[in-house]
Image (cartoon, rainbow, N blue to C red):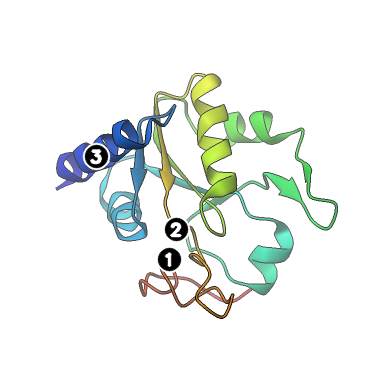
Amino acid sequence: MISEILERAQARARQMNLPYEGALTPEEAYQLMTSAPGAKLVDVRTRAELDWVGRIPGAVEIEWQSYPSMQLNPHFPAQLERQVDKASLVMFICRSGGRSHQAATLAKQLGYTQCYNVLEGFEGGKDAQGHRNTVGGWRVAGLPWIQG
């Protein structure tokens, strides 16, 4: 099952011309998080998002940007290197997939060998009314999360 998920994610990355190993659905990321030895899910959302929107149990939390200024976290590389081994399968998640794409790209540049982005993120895309948490994402998929 692990190798099948990784193969699908790698095929998506080739189709999307991504600079890292693969792109995962939230369900695939959860399966890897719970079954692939040493796999790490890195949540790059802001502290405000984690506190007010919800957290993923077992995820490593490292802000990509800081709220409210949304300036890049200059300590991200060092924090990542302290908490995640470069040889680990590492998956990045954010609200909807943008910041986690940037984090996966940087991690690849830093020498991480198995970088994956979680498509749809925690809250998914916006619906016709402009609301999240109804179309795609970790929460809509019914995967484990807790309110801050």
Mark 3 vs mark 2: give the one in front: 2
First in sequence: mark 3 vs mark 1: 3
Q: Residue at x 19, y 44 (%)?
A: 2
Q: In the rendering, which numbered label is found on residue 6?
A: 3
Task: Classify 10 Å Cα crowding around label 3: few (below 14), some (14-19), many (20 and above).
Answer: many
Closest to the observer: 137 or 110? Answer: 137
> Could you tell whether 130 is left or right of 69 in the image?
left
Q: Quadrant of the C terminus?
A: bottom right
Q: How far from the left and from the top, in percent, is residue 48?
A: 73, 64
Does dot 2 land on a helix, a strand or a loop?
loop
Amino acid under disc 3: Leu
Q: Residue at x 24, y 39 (%)?
A: 6
Q: CA distance from mark 3 to mark 1?
A: 18 Å
Residue 61 drawn above or below residue 76: below
Q: Residue at x 52, y 41 (%)?
A: 101
Mark 1 vs mark 2: give the one in front: 2
Pointer 1 and pointer 2: residues touching (CB < 8 Å)? Answer: yes
Q: CA distance from mark 1 to mark 2?
A: 8 Å
Q: How far from the left and from the top, in percent, is residue 13?
A: 34, 35
Most distant residue in the right direction: 69
> Could you tell whether 42 is left or right of 61 in the image?
left
Most distant residue in the bottom direction: 129
Does dot 1 land on a helix, a strand or a loop?
loop
Task: Classify 10 Å Cα crowding around label 2: few (below 14), some (14-19), many (20 and above).
Answer: many
Name the residue tied to disc 2.
120
Q: In the rendering, which numbered label is found on residue 138?
A: 1
First in sequence: mark 1 vs mark 2: 2
Q: How far from the left and from the top, in percent, is residue 110?
A: 55, 21
